[in-house]
Amino acid sequence: MHAYSKLYLDSAMNTLGYMLEYAVYDVKISPRDAFDRFMISGIANRYEKGDSTYTVGRSGVEIMEEAMIQTDKGWVFIEKQFRPDRTPEFWAGWALAYVQWELGCTFKDILEVFPIEKVIEAYHPYHEMDVKQFRDYVIERMLSSGKVSRLKERREEMGLSQSQLAKKADIPVRTIQQYEQRQKNINHARIMYLTALARVLRCNEADIMEYDFSGIEP
């Protein structure tokens, strides 16, 4: 289920492309700094949820400007210079917007296993291919990353042991161990289990479920 209509996708992709290009070439900050500010400011979260204020209502320059103001109180606006050709940074932001829309996960999820610097490096040869081929490459990287389960990650962020979480959620500790070790698929867990875990961990059910790309069209 996509967060916003495909009708707005081209605009959202171009906006993120221009945002990153502006950040690197005009504001002169690193790509990682630009995306860190994009996420820390909360704008990324609104983008992921399809908030039209950001996906289609503002330019890439305006989005970066807002992120800079929120994260650097002394920042002074810098004009964007015209560039006749698209840059690798533009393509990276453009492609990331597509991947995030298509997969339905967060920018943080993607960038944790595929840092923005690596996305820019993928410009060659992926910018000459259908963007779906880059999407498939990202999926492959995410599935093979060996990253700890999202349930374990969230539990540790909350400072809870498996036993403490089990007690608070009224779920067998062995079940939690099986979810974290991926011996059981948490995406197929009972609704009551997901609800209880999300309540204790103060998050949405989707935040502790695993990546599931089985419904992605080829």
Image (tube, rainbow, N blue to C red):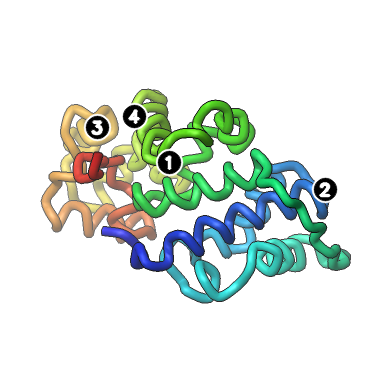
Residue density around tag 3, few if under 14, some if 14–19, many if 20 or more, within 10 Å? some
Label 2 is placed on what type of residue? Lys
Q: Tell me: residue 102, above or below residue 113.
A: below
What is the CA distance from the residue labelled 4 to the residue labelled 2?
Answer: 33 Å
The label shown at residue 208 is: none
Residue 19 drawn at (x, y percent): 66, 57
Quadrant of the frame with the N terminus:
bottom left
- Label 3 or label 2, whichever lies nearer to me, is 2
Label 1 is placed on what type of residue? Val
Q: Quadrant of residue 73?
A: bottom right
127 lies left or right of 171: right
The label shown at residue 177 is: 3
Which residue occupies 47% across, 74% down? 52
116 lies left or right of 8: right
Residue at image mark 1: 131
- Label 1 or label 2, whichever lies nearer to me, is 1
Which of the two discs, 4 and 2, labels the residue nearer the N terminus? Answer: 2
